[in-house]
Image: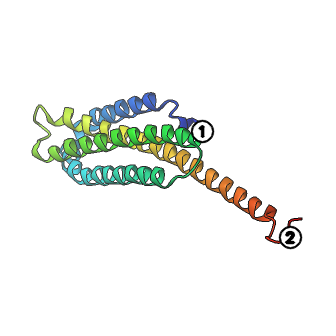
Amino acid sequence: MRRALQAGTGRTLATIFAVIAGASFVAYVWASLGQRILDTGPKVAFIAAAFSVTAYNLRTRVVDLILKFEGTPDRVELLSGIAKSCGRKLTNLVLFFTLTALVMGSMSFLKADGSLGMPVAAGALGLFLGSCIQFVYVLFAFERLERFMLDDAEERARQKEKARLLEVPEGKAD
């Protein structure tokens, strides 16, 4: 399952399901909890904004990892492909969570008996759940990138140690 998450398998379907489930939940409980949901939205917007900042920080971390990487052109090319994919996913995630935070923040201006209250709340919860699903997938993609970097560092350390052990001291070669 870990490899499927790292590869992004089913991400779009899982996100769509989460959005629909969140919107359906709000529609189901709206009659009894409408105003409470609207009052809670702006508070949860701070969580969405925090996730957005976290995703942005991960994005800058990806760039830092790439800039520090030393390897053969083939390894750099492979790492660059993984990093570009991860960076694109993180950029989308930043935008997704920012949009979610904006929609959730706007809920404080709405009333449960108004015509926009339920659709905005349903959309906000759907966006939030969809964003959370995307965040899980991105974390696993980032883990894949880290594993690549760590495996490469381990291999370089082995090669360095092998070269050190096989090195012939000066004056001993005949």
Q: Is residue 73 left or right of residue 171?
A: left
Q: Earlier in the sequence, mark 2 or mark 1?
A: 1
Is 109 situated above or below 46?
A: above
The tag on residue 170 is: none
The residue under the point 49% across, 47% down is: 142
Describe the element under mark 2 as helix, strand or loop.
Answer: loop
Question: Contact, CB < 8 Å: mark 2 with mark 1?
Answer: no
Give SS at disc 1.
helix
Residue 3 numbered tag: 1
Residue named by callout 2: 172
Q: Residue at x 64, y 51 (%)?
A: 151
Asked which quadrant contains residue 28, the reply is top left
Give residue 32's position: percent from left, percent from top: 24, 41
Q: CA distance from mark 2 to mark 1?
A: 50 Å
| Residue nearest the viewer, comparing 127 with 113 | 127
Relative vertical location of residue 9 with respect to residue 166 in this rendering, above or below: above
| Amino acid, disc 1 | Arg
Q: Evaluate whether residue 78 shows in this view.
A: yes
Q: How is the image coloured?
A: rainbow
- 116 vs 158: above or below: above
Q: Give the left or right position of residue 174, taking residue 15 as reference.
A: right
Q: Position of residue 3 (x, y in %)?
A: 60, 38
Depth order, front residue of 102/67: 67
